[in-house]
Amino acid sequence: MSLWDSMKMFFVRRKLLANQIPDGCPHPLEEWMAIRARATIKGNAALRKSIGVPKEMTREVFDEYQMFRFREQMAYARKNTPHYRRKLEGFDIESIRTYEDLQRVPFTTPGELADDPFHFFAVSRTQVKKEFTTSGTSGVRKTIGYTVNDLISKIDIVASALKDIGMGPGDSLHVMFPTVSAWDPSLVLVGACKILGYGSSTCSDTDISVQMETIRNAGSTFIIGLPSFIHRVTVLGSRDADLKSLGIRAIISTSEPLSEGMRDNLEEAWGCKVLDVWGMTEFGLACAIECYEQDGLHTDEANLLFEVVDPETGMHVPPGVEGELVLSSLNAEGTVLLRYRTGDVAAMFDPPCACGKTFNRKLRKPRGRLDLQYKIGLGSKTFPAMFDEVMFADPAVVDYRLEIGKDGYRDTLEFTVEARESGDEVATRLIDAVKGIYEISLGMEEDLIAEPTMRFVEIGSMEYSAKARKIVDSRDNQD
Ligand SMILES: [Zn+2]
């Protein structure tokens, strides 16, 4: 490391609130949010006067922090971005005091962001340290700009999340993504480990022996990666290797939906818990992480404001009720997004959590995106995750593709399966599992869905791609 790098590292370390979390703190993630909120309250006279600087962080105080940051972010966006200068012209920002008030603030749509991403930049492009362009699951390209402070802030939350799941000195994080082009997740992950003084290793090889060697050499105790990639390596590797012998304490699944079937398989093979992470590129990926209760994901409420709305009316739904997730940045410098309609279906839960966190709201794992639903049979909406759930629950399945077609009036479901074993027995097992999906069984009862079919292909013949669409809908004129 050059002198310049080590000086930079020194300053970043000093800036990081994750390093202010006391040793032995039972809930580092929540403590980190409390530290951040307290710092804001301390630094603002009006806020200090109205709520004081509380020793104990409560939900009420944290709400005040969030609403304050939201107003600040609105004012910042109106002053510095062409998009919000237009959209918020004449808007009474100071009138936004409560969660209910947020409903008066106009939404931002992914389409608006895709049309002109630079109209959401609040700084000049020379001040943007990193630009990420996402193709997105729906195929619309969006460019997001991060300043140095945005990146440090992301490293900060990731560092406190790593502490929260039990990483400490002597631990090492193994980063397991397939070779990726546009965005390198290891940038933030390895950065967070370095700053905390933890070890890290990165390996993109699908060969399990190479992965195991890297894990052993680095003394890895935690793994993070794409679930489909970890699953592939696990299914292919667990035949001749005892993965439990590696002593991994937890696996963190990120950037893709984790089906419960896949989770069960991974937990069984590695002998540890698998924790889910949810995020979107628009908000720097890591936005929520599960605790060991595995009952909802703890959200980064210091940097993000979460709302759930009825997708039709745009109005809030009560806690625990599913709707469309709407996110706002609270501290962004580069790309600012206010009330951004994510298109993700989710529900929010009020604290406390059985893990002991007292004020942080949780997110129920999103089932899927609104624009990635398929109407099959009776017209019940089907999410790709439902098929993941049953297919990846089978220990033989490495990966699969599904083509939805039409035969007369019936919908057809043709699966192509990359599997460790094939034959009639496996096919029957998988077909029964698919028929066990409620929406599919209803459609079959009404004779609107034909018997699903399974075609097996050799392992390795299906090209692994993190972003490949697993489901192809080749029916015409679908509304
Ligand atoms: Zn919890």
Image (cartoon, grey):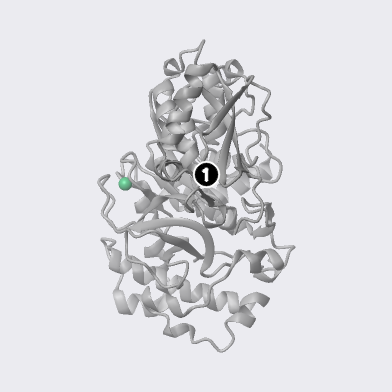
In front of the other: 80 or 443: 443
Image quadrant of residue 359? bottom left
**Image point (45%, 71%), residue name:** 69
Rendered location of residue 145, percent (x, y) = 66, 59
Q: Is residue 175 visible?
A: no
The residue identified by callout 1 is 384
- Where is residue 227 drawn, in percent x and y? 52, 35
Count of numbered tags: 1
Callout 1: few (<14), some (14-19), or many (20+) C-alpha neighbours within 10 Å?
some
Q: Residue at x 62, y 48 (%)?
A: 8
Direction right: furthest residue: 126
Residue 157 x/y as whole percent: 47, 50
Quarter occupied by the N terminus: top right
Mark yes or no: residue 191 visible: yes
Quadrant where the image shows the C terminus:
bottom right
Task: From this view, report whether residue 31 is shown above or below residue 208.
Answer: below
- On screen, 200 above or below 441? above
Near-viewer residue (452 or 207): 452
| Element assignment for label 1 | helix
Q: Considering depth in this image, is 413 or 232 the residue closer to the camera? A: 413
Type of amino acid at the residue the image marks with label 1: Pro
Task: Pinpoint residue 113: horizontal percent, then vertical percent.
Answer: 65, 66
In the image as oriented, which residue stretches furthest toward the bottom? 90
Compared to residue 455, the image places residue 421 above or below, namely: above
Q: Nearer the viewer, residue 172 or 45?
A: 172
Q: Is residue 269 left or right of residue 479?
A: left
Q: From what the image shows, is residue 282 above or below residue 230?
A: below
Return the residue found at the far top.
Answer: 240
